[in-house]
Amino acid sequence: MLDREIEKNPLFVQMDALVSPMGFRVVDVYRNDRPGGIQLHLTVFSGDHEVNTDDLAAVYNVVYPRFCVLWNTRDLELEVSSPGMQRVFRDWYEFSVFCGRLVRLYSNRWSSNIEAVIVSCDDDSVTLGDVLIVDRNEKMDELVLARDEVQKARLTYRWEEKK
């Protein structure tokens, strides 16, 4: 079961306040203190377009100087990335971030992999549309799964066949 912990992380709250006015959503952020300095990894997503290198550079140029000053360091190693086509979900929060995208998840209730589009999400459940229960080759228009029925999830992509 996926936890809902990232939104309680103070670093996430700071980062989200910084990049959301730029039109991005923070997917994941973590800090690693090491002897040579601080490593900061930030994953961002935009709901209205695919994140490109110009977007990543813009986020970098806003985040890097701010956290160098906040943490009083010149040894900050910042990596800004997009979630990728097949991102593995680490937190329940990601269902709300990727609303409208195709996801592949494993359901305890169905004991099967399910491919579907995320229609909506709240704290307790996710609503899926255009559902394919992979192991049974069964299709549905809509399916609602409780949070405890989802074992794992990731973004996926259906390669379209040429006709």
Image (spheres, rainbow, N blue to C red):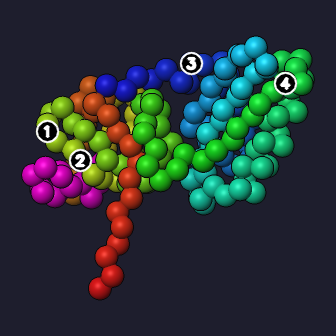
The percent position of residue 132, horizontal first and vertical second, equals: 21, 55
Numbered disc total: 4
The disc labelled 3 sits on which kind of residue?
Lys
The disc labelled 1 sits on which kind of residue?
Trp
Q: Earlier in the sequence, mark 3 or mark 4?
A: 3
Q: Earlier in the sequence, mark 3 or mark 1?
A: 3
Q: Which mark is residue 75?
A: 4
Q: Earlier in the sequence, mark 3 or mark 2?
A: 3
- Which element carries disc 4, helix, strand or loop? loop
Q: CB atoms at circles 3 and 2 under 8 Å apart?
A: no
| Left or right of residue 22: residue 141 | left
Tag nearer the camera, 2 or 4: 4
- Which element carries disc 1, helix, strand or loop? loop
Tag nearer the camera, 3 or 1: 1
Quadrant in which residue 44 is drawn = top right
The disc labelled 4 sits on which kind of residue?
Asp
Question: Within the magenta stretch, is there residue 152?
Answer: no
Determine crowd level at label 2: few under 14, some 14-19, many 20+ residues with C-alpha closer than 10 A.
many
- Residue drawn at x 54%, y 24% is 6
Determine crowd level at label 3: few under 14, some 14-19, many 20+ residues with C-alpha closer than 10 A.
few
Determine crowd level at label 1: few under 14, some 14-19, many 20+ residues with C-alpha closer than 10 A.
some
Residue 81 visible: yes
Q: CA distance from mark 2 to mark 1?
A: 9 Å
Q: CB atoms at circles 2 and 1 under 8 Å apart?
A: yes
Q: Earlier in the sequence, mark 1 or mark 4?
A: 4
Specify the segment rendered in magenta: 128-140
Q: CB atoms at circles 3 and 4 under 8 Å apart?
A: no
Find disc 3 in the rendering and name its residue.
Answer: 8
Find disc 1 in the rendering and name its residue.
Answer: 110
- Residue drawn at x 37%, y 27% is 2
